[in-house]
């Protein structure tokens, strides 16, 4: 899997994958223009969405319909360390408590994002001299005509 982030403003980046695109930016309080979600929000969204999909997967395998599923991810920023210290997920669904707990416990095995964050992961960073390009075009194409996440 490969995704890319290309600068398209003071703090904004055009994010693209094989089939989707959007713009990420810092909020005005951090010097951005608020053109899209902050990277820290994207991380929490990825955690919540992935885990929600894992819950749906497990429930489907158990032939247990899950109604009104909602996953909330929250975290406190450690500004000195520039990271989250702990991420908390809350899973809500219209199911009896014991069934939901069993599905949630099994779903832990099926989310790439939470599994990746739960263990030390090797992060390699390479510095390469970039070729020239147009920042504005990258943002415009990633945002689309209606600025919706695609």
Image: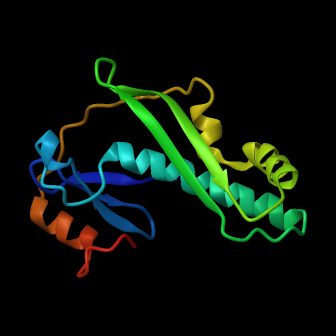
The percent position of residue 144, horizontal first and vertical second, equals 26, 77
The percent position of residue 76, horizontal first and vertical second, equals 41, 31
Q: For this view, does 116 lie left or right of residue 144?
A: right
Is residue 134 in sight in this rendering? no
Most distant residue in the bottom direction: 145
Most distant residue in the top direction: 80
Image point (52%, 46%), residue name: 73
Front residue (pair 30, 68) = 68
Is residue 38 in sight in this rendering? yes
Front residue (pair 113, 88) = 88
Image point (66%, 56%), residue name: 92
Front residue (pair 5, 58) = 58
Front residue (pair 147, 15) = 147
Image point (29%, 24%), residue name: 79
Determine the image quadrant of residue 138: bottom left
The percent position of residue 56, horizontal first and vertical second, equals 73, 63
Q: Quadrant of the C terminus?
A: bottom left
From the viewer's perspective, is residue 19 above or below residue 14? below
Image point (64%, 57%), residue name: 52
Q: How is the image coloured?
A: rainbow
The percent position of residue 40, horizontal first and vertical second, equals 36, 42
Q: For this view, does 48 lie left or right of residue 143?
A: right
């Amino acid at each position: 899997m490969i995704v890319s982030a290309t600068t398209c403003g003071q703090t904004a980046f055009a994010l693209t994958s094989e089939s989707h695109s959007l713009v990420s930016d810092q909020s005005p309080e951090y010097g951005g223009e608020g053109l899209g979600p902050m990277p820290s929000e994207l991380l929490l969204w990825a955690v919540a969405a992935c885990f929600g999909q894992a819950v749906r997967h497990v429930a489907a395998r158990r032939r247990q319909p899950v109604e009104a599923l909602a996953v909330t991810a929250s975290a406190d920023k450690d500004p000195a360390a520039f990271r989250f210290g702990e991420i908390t997920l809350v899973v809500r669904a219209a199911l009896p408590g014991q069934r939901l707990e069993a599905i949630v416990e099994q779903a832990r095995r099926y989310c790439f994002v939470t599994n990746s964050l739960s263990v030390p992961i090797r992060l390699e960073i390479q510095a390469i001299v970039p070729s020239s390009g147009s920042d504005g075009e990258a943002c415009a194409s990633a945002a689309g005509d209606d600025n919706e996440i695609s």
